[in-house]
Image (cartoon, helix red, strand yellow):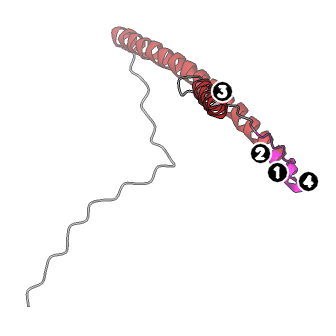
Amino acid sequence: MQSNRRFHIATAAVVLLMVVLWFSTSTGQVRRKYEVEAQVYSTPEYRTDATRAIEAYERVMERYMDATERNLTNISGDIGAVATMLDEIDTKLTKLDMRLERIERHLGILPPPVAPDPNAVPARMPVAPPVPSVR
């Protein structure tokens, strides 16, 4: 009986131990995940002197194109201002020409005749089409 009792105590202890282990690793617990990211350092790319020279030339050309674009923008603004000033001058000259014409008409002064341009190409006389002959 004594051995039977020891067997039951041992079996109860094993069952109790299994229950404790079962609850300690239950699925409801939060499991921690550890992530380790590998950091791989690579060597810098090998660049020749020609590559460096080409990249420097590209940077210089980019700066040159930017400067040229800015200058052209400024020039176009200046040309626009000059064009408006020329339009105003043309308008004033037209008014002055009309006023001078009225004064000349009132005083009876005839404007000088316009001399023909010596460099002008003489106009051709219209040529009549040839008359078809009947044979």
**4 or 1: mark nearer the eye:** 4
Give the CA distance from mark 4 to mark 1: 9 Å
In the orientation shown, which residue stands out farthest toward the front? 1
Mark 2 and 1 residues: CB-CB less than 8 Å, in contact? Answer: yes
- The mark lying in front, picked from 2 and 4, is 4
Q: CA distance from mark 4 to mark 3?
A: 52 Å
Q: Dot 3 lies on which element? A: loop
| Kind of residue at disc 2 | Glu
Magenta stretch in the rendered image: 38-55
Residue 90, labelled with which disc? none
The residue to which callout 2 is attached is 58
Residue placed under numbered mark 1 in the picture: 54
Q: Does residue 132 sit above or below 21 in this rendering? A: below
Q: Nearer the viewer, residue 70 or 45?
A: 45
Q: CA distance from mark 3 to mark 2?
A: 52 Å
Circle 1 Cα neighbour tier, 10 Å, few/some/many (<14 / 14–19 / ≥20): few
Residue named by callout 3: 32
The residues bearing labels 2 and 1 have C-alpha atoms spaced at a distance of 6 Å
Q: Is residue 40 magenta?
A: yes
In the image, residue 128 lies in the stretch drawn in magenta: no
Locate the N terminus by quadrant.
Answer: top right
